[in-house]
């Protein structure tokens, strides 16, 4: 629902939005970001200021939302700002095995969730080694040896660029809330309806209208052992 305040672009309006962006709840911040996107250069300036003030802390999905507005803008100052201050994106890209996560961050910033999902499993196979790359899917034993840094980076990228809806830790939280019951978990995240598994790719929802935890797919067609290993990984206890 659109905020009833009409944004006219005056200095007072911009200052009011700035203050509400800083002090508001997550829901208010999300709304203000969308309003600032419609104001023009003044709104972009507020978003740039907002991200600079928060850059010393790990990115949240609110930061991701502000980043996406700037990323999708044609304004030269927005692109220059991102290149100078966030050349690798809003999420710090840590990897213990030399993986370049820039392409994944770019796809997620663009909200191209289907391509990002494919790149996620390709990247996880790359982490697992040449045999996994060749077969294009994972054994649960591959997951056991994944570096925590890499799993956390992949997970954080999904969370930050999906309004907190997608990611392995999101799926894990849902699974835990259901008492680790897989039969209840699959329909909850939209991977199964009745006795029927969701068919890839057209059965899945590749946008933010999807159920919470819907993505990434993490070897959905390979049974429970891979995702169980993901949920048991020590990355989530750190």
Image (spheres, rainbow, N blue to C red):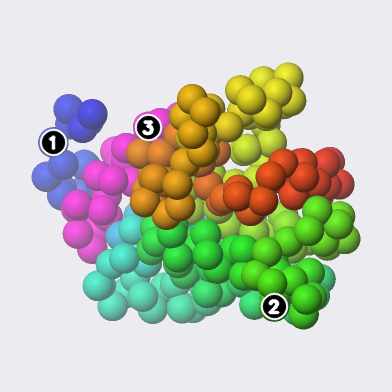
Task: Give the residue at mark 3.
Answer: 28
Q: Please, is residue 82 above or below residue 156 in the view?
A: below
Residue, x 32% and y 40% (percent of image)?
Answer: 32
Q: Is residue 87 found inside the magenta-colored segment of the image?
A: no
Can you say which quadrant of the picture contains the C terminus?
Answer: top right
Is 103 rendered above or below residue 118? below
Say what secondary structure mark 1 lies in.
loop
Q: Quadrant of the N terminus?
A: top left
Q: Where residue 198 sits in the image (x, y, percent)?
A: 47, 41
Question: Relative to 155, does residue 127 appear above or below in the rendering?
Answer: below
Which residue bears the numbered disc 1? 6
Q: CA distance from mark 2 to mark 3?
A: 47 Å
Q: Give, as a single range, the part of the protein colored magenta.
A: 15-43
Instruction: Please name the residue that numbered disc 2 is placed on.
Output: 134
The answer to whether marks 1 and 2 mark residues whose Cβ atoms lie closer than 8 Å is no
User: Under tag 3, what secondary structure?
Assistant: helix
53 left or right of 125 in image: left
**Residue 109 seen in the figure:** no
Between 158 and 37, the one nearer to me in the picture: 158
Q: Residue at x 40, y 31 (%)?
A: 27
Dot 1, how many residues are within 10 Å of its Cα: few (below 14), some (14-19), or many (20+)? few
């Amino acid at each position: 629902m659109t905020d009833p305040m009409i944004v006219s672009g005056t200095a007072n309006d911009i200052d009011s939005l700035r203050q509400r962006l800083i002090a508001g709840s997550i829901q208010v911040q999300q709304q203000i970001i969308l309003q600032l996107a419609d104001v023009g250069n003044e709104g972009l300036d507020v978003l740039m200021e907002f991200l600079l003030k928060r850059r010393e802390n790990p990115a949240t999905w609110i930061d991701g939302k502000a980043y996406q507005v700037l990323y999708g803008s044609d304004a030269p100052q927005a692109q220059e700002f991102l290149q100078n201050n966030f050349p690798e994106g809003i999420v710090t890209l840590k990897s213990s095995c030399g993986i370049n996560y820039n392409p994944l961050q770019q796809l997620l910033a663009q909200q191209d969730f289907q391509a990002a999902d494919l790149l996620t499993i390709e990247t996880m196979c790359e982490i697992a080694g040449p045999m996994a790359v060749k077969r294009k899917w994972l054994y649960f034993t591959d997951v056991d040896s994944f570096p925590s840094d890499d799993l956390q980076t992949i997970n954080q990228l999904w969370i930050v660029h999906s309004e907190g809806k997608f990611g392995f830790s999101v799926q894990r939280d849902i699974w835990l809330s259901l008492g680790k019951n897989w039969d209840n978990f699959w329909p909850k995240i939209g991977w199964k309806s009745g006795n029927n598994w969701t068919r890839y790719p057209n059965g899945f929802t590749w946008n933010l209208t999807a159920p919470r935890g819907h993505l990434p797919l993490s070897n959905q067609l390979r049974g429970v052992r891979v995702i169980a290993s993901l949920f048991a990984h020590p990355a989530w206890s750190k």
